[in-house]
Image: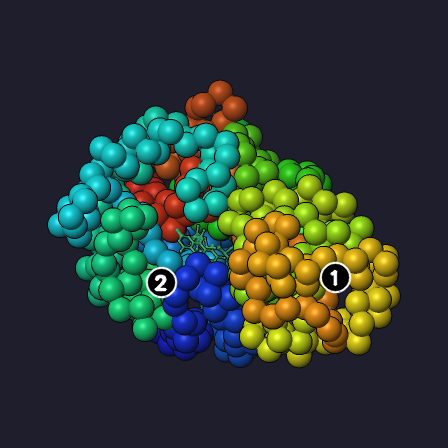
Amino acid sequence: MRKITAVLLTVVMAFSLAACGSQDETDAAASTAAQTEAAETTAAEETDAGESAEQTEASQSAGNETADIVIIGGGAAGMSAAIKAAASDVRIILLEKQGFLGGASAMASTGINAGGSDLQMETEVPYTADQFYEYALSWDYGYDRIGYRVVPVREDYAYTFAYNSADAAEWIESLGVELAASSESHSLQLADKSQGGFGSVYVSALLAELEKYDNIDVRTNSPAVEITADENGAVSGVVVSGSDGEYTIDTTAVLIASGGYASADSEFYQTYAPAWDGYYSYGAAGATGDGIVMADSLGAQLLGMDAITCTTATVGEPNQAGALSVADALKGGAVLVNSEGERFVNESAGTADMMEAIKAQTDACAYLIADAATLEETEALQAVQEAGKLSEGATAEELAKALGLDAETLAGTIASVSEGIAAGADEYENETFVSDYAEGPYYGVLVKPARRIATGGIVTNGNAEVLDENDTPITGLYAAGEVTAYGAHPLSAATIFGRQAADSIVAFLGK
Ligand SMILES: Cc1cc2nc3c(=O)[nH]c(=O)nc-3n(C[C@H](O)[C@H](O)[C@H](O)COP(=O)(O)OP(=O)(O)OC[C@H]3O[C@@H](n4cnc5c(N)ncnc54)[C@H](O)[C@@H]3O)c2cc1C
C-alpha cells in the first residue's frame, strides 16, 4: 500500500500546479490539470497494475475473500469514509477503477461550504449551522446563486448535512489544510491559494492520512462491476474486475462512493438522462455513473438525474472527458453565433443563463468567433488552435465557409458587432470586447456546454443509507458524495456523508 500511495501522491502533485483565481480561471486550470492527470495516469497505471495483479491473484487462489466494508471509489467520499471507519476494528477494502485515487475531488477548484464552523463564526457576518440547514431545506430543482444545479433533499439528509458541516470542515483543517472563510459565499477556501486548487491540496492530505491505517486495503485499477444481494435483498458482496479476471469479495456492508456521471457513455445517458446524451465532459474520466447502475439494479431510488452543471463553452468530443474550456474567451471579447450565424446572447452572461441560452439553439451548440486581437488575448483559444481545432478565414465569408455557416449572415453579424463596438452600444450589451472586429482574419470553433458535475443520483437518508422506492433502506448499502442526490455543494456532501456512512456502517456491524 505504501508504494501505491507514493505513486498517487506524485500524480496529485500535478494537480497542485493548477492556478487559483476566478471560477472561470480555476476551471481552465482544472481542465489543464485533468489533462496532466490523463498523461500521468499511464505511468501510475503501469506501476499499480503490477501490485493490483498480485492482490487479485492472492484473492482468487484463496476463493472468495471477505471484508467488513467494501468502499467503491477513492475520491473525497471514499477516502473520508475509509479513514473514519478505520479507527474501529474493521477490515476495509477500497476499490478504485483508475490507476490513482482522487477522482473529481482532486479537480475541485474553489472550496467547501459549511455552517457554524469556528472560522465562519469569527467573521464579521457569522454563518450558523441553523442558517445552513434552512438553506438546505430550500433546495429545489433549479440553480443556486452561482449557477450550479440543485435538487431537493430529505429533511433528515439536510439535518446531517448542515449540523455535521462544521465538524467536516474542522476535520479537513486537522489534516493540515489551512482554510479561510468567505462570508460572501459561505464557503471555506484555501488560506493560501498559491498552493494550487482546493481539491489537489485536500486530496494530498487525505492520501497522507490514509497511509496511516493498516486496516485499509487500497486497490487501484480495480473497478467494482456488481454489488450482489442475498435472497432478502441485503448486500452480500462485490464483484471486482481484476487484471486476471473477475473475483468476488464477500461483505455485508458496501459504500458506493464512485462519484458522478459527467463522463458516462451514450448508453448511460439514453437510460437515465437522454437530453444530456452527446454533450462533452469537463468532469473526471472516472465519473462514468457505475455506482448509479449498480444501485439501480438493487432497486435504489434515483432522483434528479438531469440536474447537471456545465462548463458553458467547450471544445471536445461527445460523451468523452477532456473537453477544453473556452469560457474565458467569452469574458474576453469573443462573439457567439448559432448555427444560423446569428448572435443570441450577451457573451459575458453568467453560467446558468449562458447554459440555457446555448441549449436553446439548434443542436444545442454555438460557434465562438474571434478576431486576431481577441485570439492574442485568450490563452484558452490559443490552446484550441494548437490542438488544430480552430478554423480560420481571411474574411468573415471565408470563415463561414470553413465552419459550414451561411456566409452572408455571418458577415452581416460580424459587421453589426463591429458597428456596435464603434458606437459604444452593443446590441446585447456586451462590454468585454478588446478589439473592433473591423477586419479579418477571423477565427471560429464549434462549442457546446460540457457536463461537469451531476447533482442528481441515488437517494439516501441522513444516515447515508440507500433508500428503495418505498423509502426503505436497502440493508447493508450506503452511498455518499456525487453519486447521490446530494442537493448542492458536492465536495461538502462527499466529506460529510463519507464520514457519516463510516459511522453508520460501524454501528450496523456492531463494531
Ligand atoms: C473542474 C471541477 C471543479 C470543481 N470544483 C468544486 C468546488 O470548488 N467545490 C465543490 O464542492 N465541488 C467542486 N467540484 C465537484 C467535486 O469536486 C466533486 O463533485 C466531488 O469531489 C465528488 O467527490 P466523490 O468522492 O463523490 O467523487 P470522486 O472524487 O469523483 O471520486 C469517485 C471515485 O470513484 C471511482 N470510481 C468510479 N466508478 C468506479 C467503480 N466502478 N469501481 C471503483 N471505483 C470507481 C472514480 O474513478 C473516482 O476516483 C468540481 C468538479 C470539477 C470537475
Residue at point 34% right, 56% down?
111
Judging depth in this view, the residue of 257 and 376 nearest the camera is 376
Return the residue found at the far front.
Answer: 423
Q: Is residue 186 above or below residue 19?
A: above
Q: Secondary structure at mark 1?
A: helix
Count the numbered circles shown: 2
**Going by the image, does 221 lie left or right of 340?**
left
Mark 1 CB near ligand 1 (8 Å cut): no
Q: Secondary structure at mark 2?
A: helix
Residue wearing tag 1: 415
Decide if residue 302 is in sight here: yes
Residue wearing tag 2: 198
Q: Is residue 360 above or below residue 370?
A: above
**Going by the image, does 133 lie left or right of 493?**
left
Judging depth in this view, the residue of 198 and 399 nearest the camera is 399
Mark 2 CB near ligand 1 (8 Å cut): yes
The tag on residue 277 is none
Residue at point 31% right, 38% down?
161
The residue type indicated by label 2 comes to Phe
> Quarter-wise, where is residue 198 in the image?
bottom left
Decide if residue 254 is in sight here: no
The residue type indicated by label 1 comes to Ala
Q: CA distance from mark 1 to mark 2?
A: 43 Å
